[in-house]
Amino acid sequence: MTVRDHGAGGRHRHPGLALLLAVTAAAALWFVVQKVLLYGSFDPGAYDSLWPRRFGLLAHLAGGTVAILTGVGQLWLGLTDRTAGLHRPLGRIYVIAVAVGAVGGLYLALTTGGFAYSAGLSGLAIAWVVTTGMAVLAIHHRALHQHREWMIRSYIVTFAFVTFRIFEHILGSLNVAPPDQIASFLAFACWAVPLLLAEPLIQLRKIRHGGAF
């Protein structure tokens, strides 16, 4: 397998991607400050009704946070062909984080009341495992283009943590529905809608480049 590493000369060739990932990283840090640090205090009052399920929540948040932060770097390294050095160890960390987060998510889904919310959270955990698993399978078979596609899908699901909180805040501020209905809606929408919107973009890029992403 030929690996290209553009080095310092390629750092200014992807301004659009750099800007997109910078915004993504900023949103991820906002999520960490808003939610992860809150639950990191291990204060029962902060957890409220989730206190009995705190270990599942912490696994979900810890795995998701590590995956969000490492995933930004992985996307930059992969999409700019800088796959030497950090890309492989970061990828392993990302996959382990996804596994931990998905197990925590499934536990919360099975122990949290409300059918719609639980089903959405279960779907998120399953989509997380499937998309990441397909990315691992693709790179194992040296299918680089498919690996990139599945990693993008995987990170979209990973970023659902942040998407959920952003739109929960927006929809709550607009008072469009009671909080429990907003949460039930976003349990599906935070990952399914972004995947749906991203797929045509992935396929259009492949069409324009003769089947290669």
Image (spheres, helix red, strand yellow):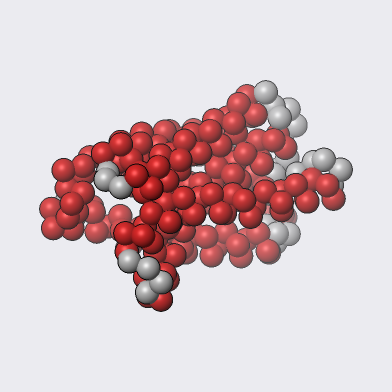
- Left or right: residue 40 versus residue 117 is left
Residue 155 in view in this figure: yes
Q: Splitting the image into 4 quarters, where does residue 45 fall?
A: bottom left
- Left or right: residue 62 versus residue 17 is left
| Quadrant of the rendering where the N terminus is positioned | top right
Q: Position of residue 70 (x, y in %)?
A: 48, 46
Residue 64 in view in this figure: no
Residue found at x 33% / y 66%: 178
| Quadrant of the rendering where the C terminus is positioned | top right
In depth, the one of 131 and 67 nearer the eye is 131
Residue found at x 44% / y 65%: 167
In depth, the one of 32 and 8 nearer the eye is 32
Q: How many labels does the image show?
A: 0
Q: Where is residue 201 in the image (x, y as percent from the top left)?
A: 71, 53
Residue found at x 42% / y 51%: 187
Q: Where is residue 97 in the image (x, y as percent from the top left)?
A: 41, 38
Q: Splitting the image into 4 quarters, where does residue 149 fall?
A: top right
Q: Where is residue 126 in the image (x, y as percent from the top left)?
A: 47, 35
Residue found at x 61% / y 46%: 152
Residue with the most extreme bottom position: 174
